[in-house]
Image (spheres, rainbow, N blue to C red):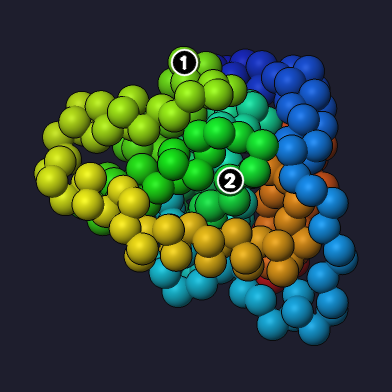
Amino acid sequence: MSTNLKISLGLVVVALAVILGLALGNSASDQPTAATPAPETVASTPVMRADTHKLDVAADGKVTLVEFLDFECEACAAVYPLIEELRKEYAGRMTFAIRYFPLPGHRNGKIAAQAVEAASKQGKLEPMYKRMYETQKEWGESKDSKKDVFIGYAEDLGLDMTKFQADLESPATIARIEKDMQDGANLGVVSTPTLFLNGEMMNLQSADQLRSDIESAFTAR
């Protein structure tokens, strides 16, 4: 591991310790208490579907990390640099996938997800995904709609704006997000970020713990 990577991950550990604990609590409080899903519901709900968005794909499919996320969630933004570091570290060896789970307490969480989904229809999911987290402090926690801000991001990315605006609030886009949310609820997701490693829900505590669990997943198969 390079010195720069070690330093970066060290900083991420500190960020997780300071920000994640606070933000996870806030995220959880935004979500109403849900009944524990019945075992048969959990068993029949896939963590990842055939059309789930994948940021990276490993040919052998040995290890897969799926994140249920909310683009307005501070904890998700705190974890984002760690996920990006892990994507570089495990490039070609590990599949990283995302699913939408905007929390009801966030005014712009759902429309942000819609913007990312609309961008995905033009092959720009990852640039829009990154833009959301990199600018979250500029639009997050607002009581006003930031739809126009997200339209501006689409313009910056050079998207076909007629198509983007049609897709932004189309029934298909909304249905896609709501399906992810329903699957998440069926799987017991109540806050974000919630990570599943090879189909098992994780208890995210630190960067070191996440890396250790990933390494264990490689050796277990």
Q: Which mark is residue 5?
A: none
Amino acid carrying mark 2 in the image: Pro
Q: Secondary structure at mark 1?
A: helix
Residue at the image point whose x is 36% and y is 43% from the top:
115
Circle 2 residue: 102
Q: Where 72 sits versus 65, above or below?
A: above
- Of residue 146 and residue 68, the one placed in the foreground of this image is 146
Secondary structure beneath label 2: loop
Say what amino acid the circle numbered 1 marks.
Answer: Glu
How many marks overall?
2
Q: Position of residue 88 (x, y in %)?
A: 47, 38
Q: Quadrant of the N terminus?
A: top right
151 horizontally vs 60: left or right: left
Q: Which of 211 and 180 lies nearest the eye of the viewer?
A: 180
Q: Is 152 placed above or below 102 here?
A: above
138 horizontally vs 27: left or right? left
Residue 111, compared with residue 20, is above or below; it is: below
Of 211 and 15, nearer the camera is 15
Q: Earlier in the sequence, mark 1 or mark 2?
A: 2
Relative side of 49 to 131, left or right: right
Picture residue at 66% right of the left edge, 61% below the top: 184
The residue beneath circle 1 is 138
Seen in the image, is 128 located left or right of residue 13? left
